[in-house]
Every structure is written in structure tokens, then in C-alpha cells.
Amino acid sequence: MDTKFQVISPVDGSVYAERQLASDTEVEKVLAAAARAQKSWKSTSIAARAAICRKAVQYFLEQADEIAEELSWQMGRPIRYTPFEINKGFQERAHYMIDIAEGALADVKPEAQAGFRRFIRREPLGVILVLAPWNYPYLTSVNVVIPAIMAGNAVILKHAQQTPLCAERYAAAFEYAGLPEGVFQYLHLSHSQVATVVADSRIAHVAFTGSVEGGKAIQQAVSRRFLAAGLELGGKDPAYVRADADLDYSIENLVDGSFFNSGQSCCGIERIYVHEQLFDHFVEGFAALAKQYVLGGPLQPETTLGPMVRASAARFAQEQINEAIRKGATALIEPQLFPAHREGTPYMAPQALIGVDHSMQIMMEESFAPVVGIMPVKDDAEAIRLMNDSRYGLTASVWSANVDEAIRIGEQVETGTCYLNRCDYLDPALAWTGVKDSGRGCTLSSLGYESLTRPKSYHLKIIG
């Protein structure tokens, strides 16, 4: 077996980094160290854990520009945006989960009962395996890494082979912060090695973010043990623009929600339903704004749309577009408007299609690309039916001036999160979860601590 792997940069096809897969001996050493370190770490006070985690976050903030350039080279996001993954989302989520830990992990005390002391204590699970993707490598991983450590667990992080330097950055941050050795570690692993680690009795929980197929593989692996897995999988997230929506605001935000990060977001907008009264104006404005993107090398400050992660991803999305056009759809954007667009490379122009329907893959299967289908609907009922006509259920957004109507629609839409007048954003105070093939489990908010701890009841009878 070839034990080396290369990071091929989507920027120019060069080898940006080369790493070695962990040996069996190294895997065993990491597992043993994690199990050993966790036994003492769980006795560390929450205040002491918080001080270390805050210092680790500070490392990321101090190194944000360097990390951003590293990230652009690894996965292609424009340099004008990559620092915000650290400075905004990563920092916001990490600090929120640190700040609420004391309350979220506090004992649960039922009503007093004479002669007894009763409470439920949340104990750490043990060693948490975090399997993180390349598209938002810090934002997705921080959802589990920080709260897992705050809850008294040890963490082993395995990042996608496209972004291995991100795992190494975590290690540097926790070393800088003075985290005891073994509490956080990372491994570069193959798929077969991941299955072996999951099967190890020292792993107490698996947190996976990735494809539906990957989630099924993790589910199969954990099914052999009494082990839970948090699965954040794919999305085909819909937006519904009601007749009372602010048209210009909706267009501006839905273009961004569709094309930011080259559409490579699990909760990015992939299909849009617009009330027929607004449809023509919406489509015209959407296409006009999309044409203002600047597709190019992500290290150029003027670039607003970088390459996709690899040429095969762009080719997959183009095949979806071609199938829709064969079935009668119309593409609104000429790729020739974007000189950097080149077939056979990761550089793909944004695209929006009309004349689409649910017989087309572009409206049914995840694209994970800067492409979106737009359909007219006659009323709320039709929009709800179409939004629910999907095997995915991560987020859905409603664009309207009526909050009560948005809630009413949200109650009928089968998703983990419902937005009004925004999209593609995770509020750390709210539970992040999906339904159907978008996964199971929950991260963020106080509820995010529940999957990283187990309840232990104390029923104490007082004599004399």
C-alpha cells in the first residue's frame, strides 16, 4: 500500500503538500495516549479547560492570515474570504461553546425530596473521533473539537486528505495553549484505517461531516458496536421567495448563498422557488448579479469566485447542467463571460437555470457547485410540496416580510433549520442538525453537549 498522499492544489494543479499515512504503530500510540490522557483531563475543572481552549482560539486568530493563505492553496477559496473562516465563524462558535459550557454541563437537579440527594451528572464519553471535510475544514471541525474537549473528552481529529494542514494547525494551537499531551491528537488515515479506528473499543463517539455515502460507511462501521455517531451529511437546500419578499434583498443574498465558496457548502442554496408574481424580475436580477462575479486564481485579491476543489467536481456539476438542458432547461449565464472558465479544470463559471423541474438531477441531487435551478410556484402550498420533495433535509429558507407566515411554512418543511431572510449561516446558539439523508445528531448550542456526554444518576439516601 502506498503510505504517502499528496495535496493537489486546485489553484494550479501543483503538489502543495505531501504527507505520510499513519502506521499501525502510530495509530496504536495515539489511541493509547488519548485514553490515558482523558482519564486525568476529565478531572480538570471547566474553568481550566476554558482557559486553555480560549488560548488555542487566540493562536488561530494570531495566525489567521497565514492559515488563510494555506487554506486557499489547499481547497481554492478566494483569499479575500478565507480569513473570515477563522476570524468570524470559527471564533464565534468556539467562544460561544466555551462560554456556555459551565451551564450546559451543570448537574441536573430534580425537585427536592426529603431524606435524599438526587442529581444527574453529565460525564464525558471518553475519546472522540472527529472526521472533518475539506470545504469548511475549520468551521465544521470546531463544532465538535472545542465542545468535546470542554466536556472532558480527548479528541482524535482526522481531516480530509485535501486539507491535512488544518489538523496540524489544531495541534499547534493546543500545544501553544498548554493542553496536556494526548488530549488532542490528529491522524492522517486512509478509509480502511478509519474503519479500523472506529472499531477500536477506546473510541467512544464518532463525529463525521461529509457525503451521504461516507455517512453510510460510518454508520455501518459503528453498527458493530454500541456506539453513536453524529452524521452531518449532504444537502439540497431550498429557498422560497414569497410574493411579499423584498426582491432586491432576496436576490443579493440568494446569489451569495448559491455561489459563495463556489457552491461547495452543505447548507448552500441549491434550488430556488419563486412566487410567479416575482419570478421574471427575480430571474433577471439574479442573472445580472451572478455575472458580476470574478472567476480567477484565489490568491488574487479581486477574485470573488475561486476554482472548485478538483476538476472532477466541476465535471460532475457540468453533467448535471447538460442533463437539465437536454430535458428543456435554459441556462441564464454564458460561461464565455468568464475568461478563467475552462472545461477539464476546476475553474467553473457560475450558472443558473430556469425551465427546470424535479425530473432533473439539478433539482434533486446535491451539486456542491456554483449552479442553481430556479422554478416559479403559484403559492405557499406548492412551494412547501417542492421543498419537501427531496431526500435531503438540512436547511430551508423563506424570504418574506411576514414572520408568522414564515414560521407556519417552517413547521411544514422537513429540515433541521428554517431561516427567514437569510441562509447559509450557523448560529452557535441554535442546534445544528439535519433530517432524512442530511444526517442525524446535533452540534452547537447547549444541546450539542448532550451527544458528547452521558448522563449518570446519583440517588443518595441520607441516614440519620
Image: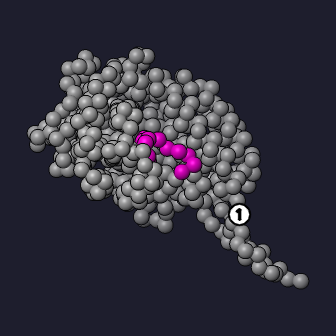
Residue nearest the viewer, comparing 191 with 11: 11
Give 356 or 112, whichever is nearer the viewer.
356
What's the amino acid at mark 1? Asp
Left or right, residue 226 beside residue 258: right
Residue 400's x, y, as percent?
39, 45
The chief SS type of the magenta part is loop
The segment highlighted magenta reads: 419-430
Frontmost residue, 419 versus 284? 284
Residue 122, image x, y percentages? 66, 62
Task: Tell me residue 14's x, y (percent).
Answer: 35, 21
In the image, what residue occupies the spot 42% across and 65% down? 224
Query: Hey, which quadrant is residue 319 in on the image?
Result: top left
Q: Is residue 234 magenta?
A: no
Name the residue at 41% across, 27% down: 77
Q: Is residue 423 magenta?
A: yes
Tell me which residue sits at (51%, 37%) in the image: 138
